[in-house]
Image (cartoon, rainbow, N blue to C red):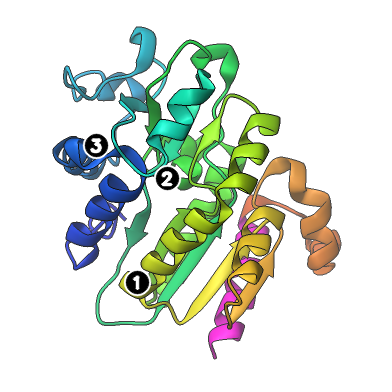
Amino acid sequence: MRDQFCNECGLSYDIPHLVAERLLGVEYLHRIENRYEQMRKSYDCTCAEWQGVFTEDLKPFGGYDDTTSVTIPIGNSQSGADIKALHKGAIGVDLPTWFNVKDNKHIMIVAQDPLRNNKYYGECYDAVISSPFGLHSLEHRQNARGGKMMDLLVKRLVTNEYGIYLTDANKFFIYDHKTTDEFSDAHIDKYAEIIRQEIEIVKPTVIVCLGRSAERMCKKMGLRNILALPHLSGTARGAIVRKFPRLEEIGATAENIAEEYAREIIRKIQ
């Protein structure tokens, strides 16, 4: 999957520019572009191998050696001043990622938010940069419950020749869920504008909303051809099984969940 991850296409130019202009600040465009290159080159690297990849301006907070996340300052973006005014750390931003995007049908998957743990990042006032479901990280794809399920889902969809684009409904996570929810509610129109820009760039055949936050955002925008599914995480397994009762018989394993989601998405497209 390394060759399909953030493969060279029109998104390679448009998405870093969108992230810079709307989220982190245009002064950090070059750093954002370098982070995409860093993720592409290190797609199959372990955390230990990542230590040789980090650079002085793209490295983990606090010298952590068990993460592939890096920090980028919050610059003069539309939301930057509002975030700085909160004086809170553990600011999460996921760079949108894509797989196998070419002249094919595109599936846009909208996740909930770029969750960060204030236990580890509470004193970090730069943005902690990762990707939706941490799919740039080998460890996340192999071990994290949501990451493993999403990785398996993406592989199934790519095998069927679809292009996949992943992004978050809430573009920032700030310190805790309460602060994040309040900030998202106050900025929901700006978030909706960004999602609309992403849709214009990606031109998806279907938009898959994972979880209530993503579904709420897409419904607020009046979008059509939406498929709402439970969030892919260990804590959402009950909701997943209720959505797909067959899992009670065959077992709610990561592999079976990914297969059910893939079937539902492909059915929606067809």
Q: Where is residue 245 in the image (x, y as percent from the top left)?
A: 85, 67
Taking depth in this image into account, of 252 and 235 the one nearest to the observer is 235
Local packing at callout 2 (Cα closer than 10 Å; few below 14, some 14-19, many 20+) is: many
Residue at 49% across, 16% down:
121
* Percent coordinates x, y for residue 70 in the rendering: 33, 26
> How much space separates mark 3 and mark 1, taking CA atoms?
24 Å
Q: Which residue is drawn at 66% across and 40% down?
A: 181
Q: Is residue 198 above or below residue 251?
A: below
Q: Position of residue 267 (x, y in %)?
A: 61, 84
Image quadrant for the N terminus?
A: bottom left
Residue plotted at (58% across, 83% down): 225
Q: What stretch is highlighted in magenta?
A: 255-270
Which one is nearer the viewer's eye here, 111 or 152? 111
How packed mark 1 is, by other alpha carbons closer than 10 Å (few <14, some 14-19, many 20 or more), is many
> Hey, what amino acid is under mark 3?
Ser
- Choose the circle earlier in sequence order: 2 or 3: 3
Q: Which residue is drawn at 26% across and 45% down?
A: 20
> Disc 1 marks which amino acid?
Val
Kindly identify which numbered label has been placed on residue 42.
Answer: 3
Tag shown at residue 135: 2
Main SS, magenta region, reads: helix
* 258 inside magenta stretch: yes
Return the mark for residue 202: 1
